[in-house]
Image (spheres, rainbow, N blue to C red):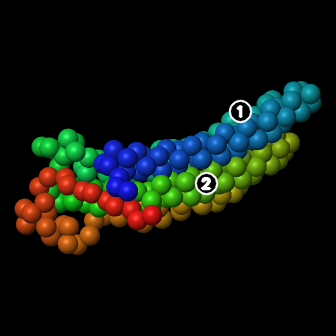
Amino acid sequence: MSLSFETMNSLCLAGGYAAIAFAAMGSSLGAGVAGMAAIGAWKKCYAQNKPAPFLLLAYAGAPLSQTIYGLIMMIFIKNQIDAGIPGSAVGKFAPEAIAKAQYALECWPLFLLMGIIGGIAMGCSAIYQGKSAAAGCVAYGETGKGFANNLMILGIVETVAIFALVFCLLAMPSGTKSMVQAANAGELNQPTLNVKIQK
């Protein structure tokens, strides 16, 4: 069975969108948990005739950044493969870039798994960041102190998502040495790729 350019491109992009999807699921769960805690903290403040701290919104919105990290991963995956699609390379990319992109298309299982696993890692970070933010909402709502300290804890939890993004970017293929040398020698000017998968 052979895969066309379009099929490999679709599988690579599926991995990119999986990163956004799983990260967004984690962000929605985390923001939901933190938001419920913020509303509960405001309710206590109103019941005690205390001013409701507006800064709790920063806690509630903290898990949203993981969705941005998923978007960044999708953009990097798309940029890796764009030059290898027939029609997109004409007059826009150097032969070396086309060679690298063709090799990247062959690595579609890597991009697919990278998007899924990386997205899950970022989503888990968002969920637990939301839980930590919920604890911060309760603490700051009752005492009015420790806002910066709580944010530092949220930053530690978010660092895991940043690690997942950076390490995925480092694992992305950039083309084999032989393909790059062939492109520089002018032997690879047009995208011609036929990948066969043994059953």
Measured as percent of width and height from the top left, residue 60 is found at 69, 39
Label 2 crowd (10 A; few <14 / some 14-19 / many >=20): many
Label 1 crowd (10 A; few <14 / some 14-19 / many >=20): few
Label located before the other in sequence (1 or 2): 1
Q: Residue at x 28, y 65 (%)?
A: 175
Measured as percent of width and height from the top left, residue 26 is found at 65, 46
Q: Residue at x 20, y 55 (%)?
A: 192
Label 1, secondary structure: give it: loop
Q: Which residue is mark 2?
A: 120
* Vertical relation: 122 (above or below) 137: below
Q: What kind of residue is marked 2? A: Ile
Q: Which residue is mark 1?
A: 54
Q: Is residue 97 visible?
A: no
Q: Quadrant of residue 1?
A: bottom left
Q: Nearer the viewer, mark 1 or mark 2?
A: 2
Label 2, secondary structure: give it: helix
* Vertical relation: 70 (above or below) 164: above
Q: Nearer the viewer, residue 63 or 196?
A: 196
Q: Residue at x 75, y 51 (%)?
A: 132
Measured as percent of width and height from the top left, residue 87 is found at 20, 41
Q: What kind of residue is marked 1? A: Phe
Q: Nearer the viewer, residue 68 or 96?
A: 96
Cα distance, mark 1 to mark 2?
31 Å
Please indicate whether residue 54 sits to the left or right of residue 169 in the image: right
